């Protein structure tokens, strides 16, 4: 029951801190920029991105089936040239639009936090001899480890700005540090299981030979 409470309360803490970070603090808005002419961009996207999904520019015909090796090499050279000249874009497009602050999206966000909290609580329950503050740090580092795997590739491969990535990491560190304060309170410190001592005068090799 305590573990269940730790999962739910930690998820609520993370959800609340993330919401406050996006709505109250200015840092996220400072890392997201406005197109010079939004209406022109919208027209281009509707004309060239007819279905919802992730789009990459430049991509050319690299994913087109049936190309020979020579054609793939030629296409890759064209794409590299365009990438070097710019612009480069990695974009998620929803031609049909979406409602802001959709309750379904907020529910999904909370479920995501629940799943993450469940996994971290399970990991924390496997530890031994950790005092309260070491548990808190463990929770924060576990969350940051997952974030390194999931978020850092957006900077490495897709060119998302260092400022945008940094704000994500700061958000995660603060939110899961706070979640760690809750988890550490609910999960008691476990002692390591004592090992069975070998009898005096007997070695492990001697026992094996006797058997």
Image: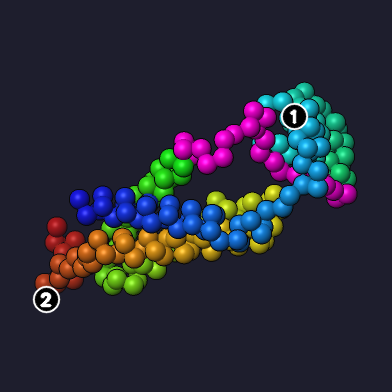
Residue at the far bottom in the pictured view: 201
Scheme of colours in the image: rainbow
Number of other residues with Cα within 10 Å of mark 1, as a class: few under 14, some 14 to 19, many 20 or more: some
- SS type, badge 1: helix
Spatial separation of the CA atoms under disc 1 and disc 2: 81 Å
Viewed as shown, does residue 69 lie left or right of 97? Answer: right
Residue drawn at 75 percent across, 25 percent down? 65
Q: Which residues are magenta?
A: 83-105
Q: Check the image and report above or below for 86 versus 50.
A: below
Q: If the image is split into quadrants, where does the C terminus sit?
A: bottom left
Q: Looking at the picture, how far across and down is residue 101, in whole percent?
A: 52, 41
Q: Looking at the picture, how far across and down is residue 77, in whole percent?
A: 86, 41
Instruction: Determine if the magenta segment contains residue 84.
Output: yes
Q: Which circle marks residue 200 in the picture?
A: 2
Instruction: Determine if the magenta segment contains residue 133.
Output: no
Q: Which circle marks residue 21 in the picture?
A: none
Number of other residues with Cα within 10 Å of mark 2, as a class: few under 14, some 14 to 19, many 20 or more: few
The quarter of the picture where residue 76 lies is top right
Viewed as shown, does residue 92 lie left or right of 45? Answer: left
What residue would you read off at disc 1? Answer: 46
Residue drawn at 32 percent across, 54 percent down? 9
Residue drawn at 18 percent across, 71 percent down? 203
Residue at the far front in the pictured view: 24
């Amino acid at each position: 029951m305590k573990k269940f409470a730790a999962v739910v309360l930690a998820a609520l803490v993370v959800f609340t801190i993330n919401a406050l970070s996006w709505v109250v603090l200015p840092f996220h808005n400072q890392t997201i920029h406005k197109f010079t002419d939004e209406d022109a961009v919208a027209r281009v996207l509707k004309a060239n991105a007819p279905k919802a999904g992730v789009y990459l520019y430049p991509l050319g015909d690299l994913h087109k089936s049936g190309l020979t090796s020579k054609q793939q090499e030629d296409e890759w050279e064209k794409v590299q040239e365009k990438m070097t000249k710019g612009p480069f874009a990695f974009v998620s497009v929803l031609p049909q639009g979406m409602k802001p602050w959709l309750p379904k999206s907020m529910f999904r966000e909370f479920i995501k936090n629940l799943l993450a909290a469940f996994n971290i609580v399970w990991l924390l329950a496997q530890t031994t001899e950790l005092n309260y503050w070491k548990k808190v740090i463990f929770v924060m580092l576990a969350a940051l480890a997952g974030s390194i795997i999931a978020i850092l590739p957006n900077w490495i491969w897709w060119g998302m700005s260092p400022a945008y990535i940094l704000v994500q990491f700061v958000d995660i560190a603060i939110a899961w540090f706070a979640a760690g304060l809750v988890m550490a309170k609910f999960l008691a410190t476990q002692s390591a299981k004592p090992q069975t001592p070998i009898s005096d005068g007997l070695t492990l090799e001697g026992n094996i030979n006797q058997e």
